[in-house]
Amino acid sequence: MTDVRKLPRHVAIIMDGNGRWAKAHALKVAMGHRKGVEALRGIIRESSDIGIEALTLYAFSTENWRRSEAEVSALMALLLEYFSSEIDELDEKNVRIRILGDKQGLPAPQREAIEKAEERTKENGGLKLNIAINYGARAEILSAVRTLAQKAKEGEILPEDITEADFSAALYTRDLPDVDLLIRTSGEMRLSNFLLYQCAYAEMVFPKVLWPDFTVADYHAALDSFGARDRRFGGRKE
Ligand code: FPP
């Protein structure tokens, strides 16, 4: 069992390997994503049960629109299905849902379902569940720069007074702590434009398992690995 005293406050996950899982099982890629959602349910439940403060999942990047129309539609349909089938349980567990990304670029039904889920759970004080959809970290950073530049232009803030806290507050993740632990499954070791600013001091683990096969035990192994690390944030421990 993971040592609760050393739990990360904020876990971020790149759920990679759905496509390879589907191929290995001679199934369509959409089935890989569907199995991926099943794996996700267990991880969300466990995060809530053990008291993780924030969990951020990379569900759809700004680059994922380049995939085939069939795969994009399957992912969009899954998202819609997810929000209608899970919302009752998530709300019951006191989970607060937040979407990170450009909502305006999403089809109307997905946007409406997301906004409904955010509205319904906004006062919940349990797990902060953030789902990155139509998300790109560079776009997020650029948008923060524009927000602050506009404030400076309007005389609300002086450029030399802008702090890291002001910058963080202009990101999609405004009230979340920095990422402590980043997990990317399937053995790939890249950030792929995910939470570039927020991962400045994140510990990273790259389990080889494909996302649909990622279990609660694998999650605990990643949490244990985090607990065993010596975090110095650039300093030195004597
Ligand atoms: C990466 O695997 C995974 C994605 C691009 C999508 C992740 C989405 C889900 C798990 C489902 C939707 C999420 C929610 C919240 C309902 P890949 O397809 O790139 O895998 P590959 O590298 O093996 O092809």
Image (spheres, rainbow, N blue to C red):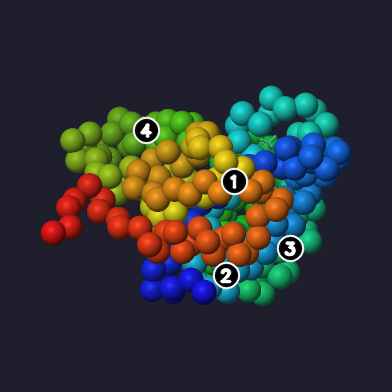
Residue under label 2: 48
Q: Residues within 10 Å of mark 4 (few under 14, many from 20)?
A: some
Q: Earlier in the sequence, mark 3 or mark 1?
A: 3
Kind of residue indicated by mark 3: Glu
**Residue hosting label 3:** 86
Asked which secondary structure carries label 3, the reply is: helix
Tell me the residue that label 1 is attached to: 208
The alpha-carbon separation of the residues under discs 4 and 1 comes to 36 Å
Whole-percent x and y of residue 76? 76, 41
Q: Earlier in the sequence, mark 2 or mark 3?
A: 2
Crowding near the residue tagged with mark 2, few <14, some 14–19, many ≥20 C-alpha atoms within 10 Å: many
Mark 2 and mark 3: Cα distance apart in space? 14 Å
- Quadrant (top left, top right, bottom left, bottom right) of the C terminus: bottom left
**Dot 3 crowding, Cα within 10 Å, few <14, some 14–19, many 20+:** few
Residue indicated by mark 4: 145
Please state which amino acid type lies under the numbered disc 2.
Ser
